[in-house]
Image (tube, helix red, strand yellow):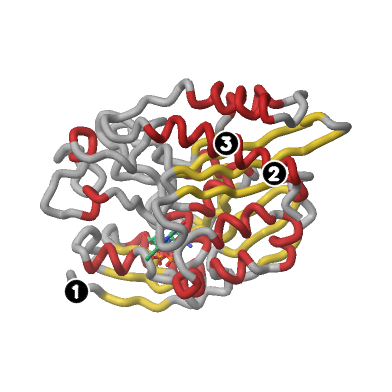
Amino acid sequence: MRAFKFTPSSEPEAAVKAVKANSEAKFIAGGTNLIDLMKEGIEGPSELVDISRLNLTQIRSTSTGISIGSLAKNSDTANHPLVRRDFPMLTQAILSGATAQIRNMATNGGNIAQRTRCPYFYEVSVNCNKRRPGSGCSSLEGYNRNHSIFGFSDKCAAVNPSDMSVALAALDASVNVLGADGKTRVIKFNDFHRLPGDTPQRDNNLEHGELITSIEIPKSNFAPHSYYLKVGDRASHSFALVSVAAALELDGGKIKQARIAMGGVAPKPWRAYAAEKFLAGKTPSEENFSAAADSEMKAAIPLEHNGFKIELGKRAIVLALKRAAAGNA
Ligand SMILES: Cc1cc2nc3c(=O)[nH]c(=O)nc-3n(C[C@H](O)[C@H](O)[C@H](O)COP(=O)(O)OP(=O)(O)OC[C@H]3O[C@@H](n4cnc5c(N)ncnc54)[C@H](O)[C@@H]3O)c2cc1C
């Protein structure tokens, strides 16, 4: 591991300034992703600015919904009464990830900014455009069973690993960030993560030194009919092969509004807009769920080893919608 300077910080502004001043500095929160990457030689910051003691841990209701601090732990967020009551799908998504011990360390900001689990990203002896821009993508010609079927480019097909982000995408969350100039800005969740295009080394739209301060989720009527379904190779310690966050607002036996996002299928949480559009105004039946899933998955482009994700994705959408419709309370 490369030697690094450790800079504790007690104020968000000071943390932002410290990272901004050093192009090789990074924030460290729970460290459950970054330290692994440093040990493997994938990341080598010359300075770690410790944000774990910043006072950004509040989870509170606001006039527009709920605000969750970027440094609240994943476990505290999942188990918070407001989250459980108003956004149970977020609780399910967080609890489907990692292990209790990791969730006790991991923070919300770190979760949404965690890096891909593509094995070629982790294996430093092979080419990877995300790790070493311009070197090539080993997954496109390699064993790409876990890779994207939507949104990838000829530079990178890695998927985003965060379960929490899939629920946040479906819930139309937004991310508050503090910049080096002391100004704050709001990034809509669906604009937070990036598709790889020609710059796969950039996972999200944060500028160097920008600190995530909170995640805001707007009020909605989805709580009684929402569900997070995760399909992986194992029931625990496993990232999603395919996951689906499905939320329905039902009114008079019809679907007033549907929200669906998928994980494990794209470089960012994938909003299933075609399926959502199909379901608006329809009855919540298996036949309609199946047609909605078909309408979304027909745009998928399989790589050599991940064609199974298309059928798996359809079935996962249908099952998540059925469970959401049945009510998860
Ligand atoms: C064995 C194992 C299994 C796992 N399984 C899953 C799983 O199934 N599903 C899942 O979703 N996740 C899983 N994870 C990942 C885990 O959720 C993340 O490691 C964790 O959420 C990262 O949070 P952290 O606070 O530890 O981030 P850190 O490791 O501290 O930081 C991660 C990145 O985020 C940046 N960062 C952190 N906070 C901020 C901030 N406030 N503003 C700007 N940038 C910031 C850091 O600079 C760094 O680049 C697993 C991890 C392990 C080790």
Any part of residue 216 in sight: yes
Depth check: give the residue in front, 237 or 167: 237
Q: CA distance from mark 1 to mark 2?
A: 49 Å
Residue beneath the point at 63% across and 61% down = 68
Percent across and percent down for residue 251 are 85, 34
Percent across and percent down for residue 74 are 54, 66
Depth check: give the residue in front, 46 or 215: 215
Quadrant of image for the N terminus: bottom left
Q: Quadrant of residue 128?
A: top left
Quadrant of image for the C terminus: bottom right
Q: Earlier in the sequence, mark 1 or mark 3?
A: 1
Relative height, residue 179 to residue 292 (above, below): below
Residues packed near mark 1 inside 10 Å, few (<14), some (14 to 19) or many (20 plus): few
Percent across and percent down for residue 293 are 57, 28
Q: Is residue 306 left or right of residue 126?
A: right
Residues packed near mark 3 inside 10 Å, few (<14), some (14 to 19) or many (20 plus): many
Helix, strand or loop status at disc 2 = helix
Helix, strand or loop status at disc 1 = loop
Residue beneath the point at 23% across and 68% down = 39
Q: Which residue has dot 3 on it?
A: 317
